[in-house]
Image (cartoon, rainbow, N blue to C red):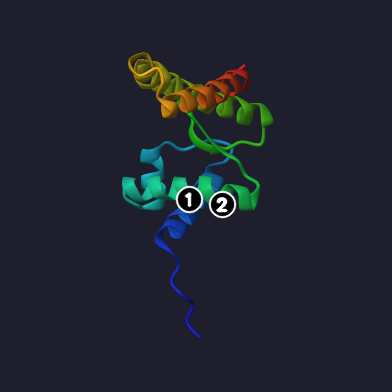
Amino acid sequence: MPRAARPLAEHYGDLVRASLIEARPAGLHTRQLVAATRLKKSQVVRGVRQVRDVAAAEHLTPIIYTRKDGYLFSDDPSDWIEYEKRQFREILGRLTRMITGTLDPHLARCPDDEWAQLAVAQLTGVRATLAQLTK
């Protein structure tokens, strides 16, 4: 019986994962992954996303990204923590801009707006948590 076709993202993820494992302990930048996998850049991006969403957890191989090395599987927990902190800092920055650039002015103009009050109250807690995670 013929094997059912796998979704493309899973196929791209398999190619990206195999290329990163082969390059280990070094990493690969997107253009290097394009060359190694013979995929288009957009397909490599989908493959990296699939590795992050599914394959990394399945294979217990955290994928990280550094400007210097590109995407890589590191066995050093300190690399994972540094990457996670960078991600949390990015999320914290986006959330802070949302609060100060949109919600605060909304609340200043409409102080009795229940939606704005709820959003600010909830997101203030999230912001405090993210700030702790970036330390």
> Which disc is residue 124 wearing?
none
Name the kind of residue labelled 2 in the image: Ala
Label 2 to label 1, Cα distance in Å? 7 Å
Q: Earlier in the sequence, mark 2 or mark 1?
A: 1
Circle 2 Cα neighbour tier, 10 Å, few/some/many (<14 / 14–19 / ≥20)? many
**At numbered mark 1, what does the secondary structure look like: helix, strand or loop?**
helix
Note whether 66 is above or below 108 in the view shown. below
Give whichever of 89, 122 is nearer the camera.
122
Rendered residue at 40%/61% (across/down) = 8
Rendered residue at 39%/45% (across/down) = 45
**Which of the 4 image quarters holds residue 73?**
top right
Q: Is residue 123 left or right of residue 108?
A: right
- Is residue 59 in view from this perspective? yes
Q: Position of residue 112 (x, y in %)?
A: 41, 20
> Which of the image's four quarters has the C terminus?
top right
**Which of the 4 image quarters holds residue 114?**
top left
Q: Position of residue 54 (x, y in %)?
A: 55, 52
- Is residue 68 in view from this perspective? no
Residue assigned mark 1 = 50
Disc 2 to disc 1: CB gap under 8 Å:
yes
Residue assigned mark 2 = 55
Q: Is residue 10 left or right of residue 35?
A: right
Note whether 19 is above or below 118 in the view shown. below
Rendered residue at 35%/52% (across/down) = 39
Circle 1 Cα neighbour tier, 10 Å, few/some/many (<14 / 14–19 / ≥20)? many
Q: Position of residue 64 (x, y in %)?
A: 54, 35
